[in-house]
């Protein structure tokens, strides 16, 4: 019973991470499910739903087909929609029941691609893992399919352009919302003296993403972008740096990290140096997406002098950037104990439900956790604006 949530909720599911990562790229995105997944994703996890069109569908799986199996129906339905809408690619992901049925999603998509001639992807999701796993798979799949090694333009070599060019990997509203964080991130990169080659994937087209191999360096701004970064490094030798520029000191350090990565052709992170020795007695406890939390910790330690900052990662993947003192946990009991071990908490407002009233709580709304519930409390954490909220 320790895995039962009494007060807290769960993070956005893996197939929703796929939807969010690919939402703006012109693909036909289908969730294999009865219907509940579509309404949950659209009304809770996707803030672009009412302002931006996208071809996100649900298969409408019924009880008979679930029990007896009827893959031909979904193949015919997807092909019919593809013939009408002419998507740039087709994606099928699985919810809980089709996953437990053993649906051969990759086989289905091979048949669909052969029939339509449209690049097609099948993701063996299960509706139980978190969004970071699904979005990570989606970004890597797009990179592998649309940025193959043979198509790299070798006429322009990294480091020979007027300014260092950067791909931003792992940008979705599940982690950055739609409150100005993406714009602040891009502006900060430009102010560092760099140019932005592509943004994976908000405010960018598939055609722009295809040019990603021409970048000098990749900046991984959430763990959802790490798989794509690893592919670009393995295939093109493009190094990556993990982290977010949160605060003035992080901006300076990030600039040096990026330039060093370009010069040395090695990967790194904003967090691979020892933290400063501080004496502040406030005990910060952070919970959420690992890159986000580690970047805020960098700000707390290097600009506010915090000495005791620990992170709880409630997801499957942490990008290898956390410390031994940090915690991996998903159960409510463990989360409650961790958050109440400090004197200040930074996390989604839902976590207030298990935090003692005498502990300082700084709201850090996370669309992948509470959806649109707390958009009115959102703030810009990228760039120098973080100082307006945490000081």
Image (cartoon, helix red, strand yellow):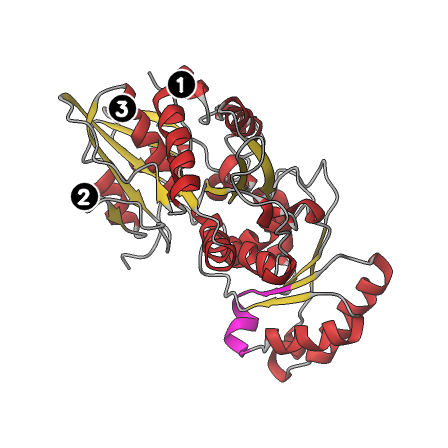
User: Marks 1 and 3: CB-CB under 8 Å?
Assistant: no
The quarter of the image holding the C terminus is top left
| Residue 51 in picture, x, y percent from top left | 72, 35
Residue 223 visible in the picture = yes
| Residue 16 in picture, x, y percent from top left | 56, 53
Q: Which residue range is magenta in the image?
A: 92-102
The vertical placement of 202 against 328, above or below, is above
Label 3 crowding class (10 Å Cα cut-off): few <14, some 14-19, many 20+? Answer: some
In the image, what residue occupies the spot 21% across and 32% down?
A: 275
Label 2 crowding class (10 Å Cα cut-off): few <14, some 14-19, many 20+? Answer: few
| 287 horizontally vs 230: left or right | left
The quarter of the image holding the N terminus is bottom left
Considering the numbered disc 3 on the image, is that residue within a helix, a strand or a loop?
A: helix
Gap between marks 3 and 2 measured at Cα: 18 Å
The vertical placement of 193 against 139, above or below, is above
| Residue 34 in picture, x, y percent from top left | 64, 65
Q: Which residue position is annotated with label 3? A: 302
Please state which of residues 126 and 165 is positioned toward the viewer in this rendering. 165
Please state which of residues 200 and 351 is positioned toward the viewer in this rendering. 200
Label 1 crowding class (10 Å Cα cut-off): few <14, some 14-19, many 20+? Answer: few
| Residue 288 in picture, x, y percent from top left | 37, 41
Q: Nearer the viewer, mark 3 or mark 2?
A: 3
Determine which of the numbered discs, if any, sits on residue 325 in the image: 2
**Chain-order first, disc 1 or disc 3:** 3
Considering the numbered disc 2 on the image, is that residue within a helix, a strand or a loop?
A: loop
Determine which of the numbered discs, if any, sits on residue 389 in the image: 1
């Amino acid at each position: 019973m320790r895995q039962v949530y009494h007060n807290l909720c769960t993070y956005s599911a893996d197939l929703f991470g796929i939807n969010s990562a690919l939402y703006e790229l012109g693909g036909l995105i289908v969730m294999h499910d009865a219907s509940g997944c579509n309404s949950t994703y659209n009304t809770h996890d996707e803030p672009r739903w009412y302002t931006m069109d996208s071809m996100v569908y649900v298969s409408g799986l019924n009880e008979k087909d679930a029990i007896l199996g009827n893959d031909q129906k979904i193949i015919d339905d997807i092909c019919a929609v593809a013939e009408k809408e002419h998507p740039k690619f087709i994606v099928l992901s699985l919810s809980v029941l089709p996953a437990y049925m053993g649906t051969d999603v990759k086989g289905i998509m091979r048949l669909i691609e052969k029939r339509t001639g449209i690049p097609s992807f099948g993701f063996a999701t299960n509706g139980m893992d978190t969004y970071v796993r699904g979005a990570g798979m989606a970004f890597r799949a797009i990179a592998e399919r649309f940025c193959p090694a043979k198509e790299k333009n070798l006429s322009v070599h990294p480091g020979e352009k007027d300014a260092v060019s950067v791909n931003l990997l792992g940008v979705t509203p599940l982690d950055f919302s739609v409150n100005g964080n993406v714009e602040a991130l891009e502006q900060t990169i430009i102010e560092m003296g760099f140019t932005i080659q592509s943004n994976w994937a908000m405010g960018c087209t598939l055609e722009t993403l295809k040019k990603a191999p021409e970048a000098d360096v990749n900046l991984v701004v959430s763990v959802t972008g790490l798989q794509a970064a690893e592919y670009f490094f393995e295939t093109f030798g493009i190094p990556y740096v993990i982290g977010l520029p949160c605060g003035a000191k992080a901006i300076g350090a990030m600039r040096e990290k990026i330039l060093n990565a370009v010069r040395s052709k090695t990967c790194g992170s904003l967090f691979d140096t020892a933290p400063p020795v501080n004496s502040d007695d406030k005990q910060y406890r952070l919970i959420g997406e690992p890159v986000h939390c580690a970047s805020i910790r960098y700000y707390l330690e290097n600009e506010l002098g915090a000495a005791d900052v620990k992170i709880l990662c409630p997801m499957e993947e942490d990008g290898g950037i956390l410390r031994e003192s940090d915690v991996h946990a998903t159960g409510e009991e463990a989360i409650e104990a961790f958050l109440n071990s400090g004197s200040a908490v930074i996390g989604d407002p839902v976590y207030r439900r298990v935090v003692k009233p005498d502990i300082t709580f700084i709201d850090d709304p996370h669309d992948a956790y509470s959806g649109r519930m707390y958009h009115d409390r959102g703030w810009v954490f990228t760039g120098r604006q973080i100082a307006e909220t945490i000081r």
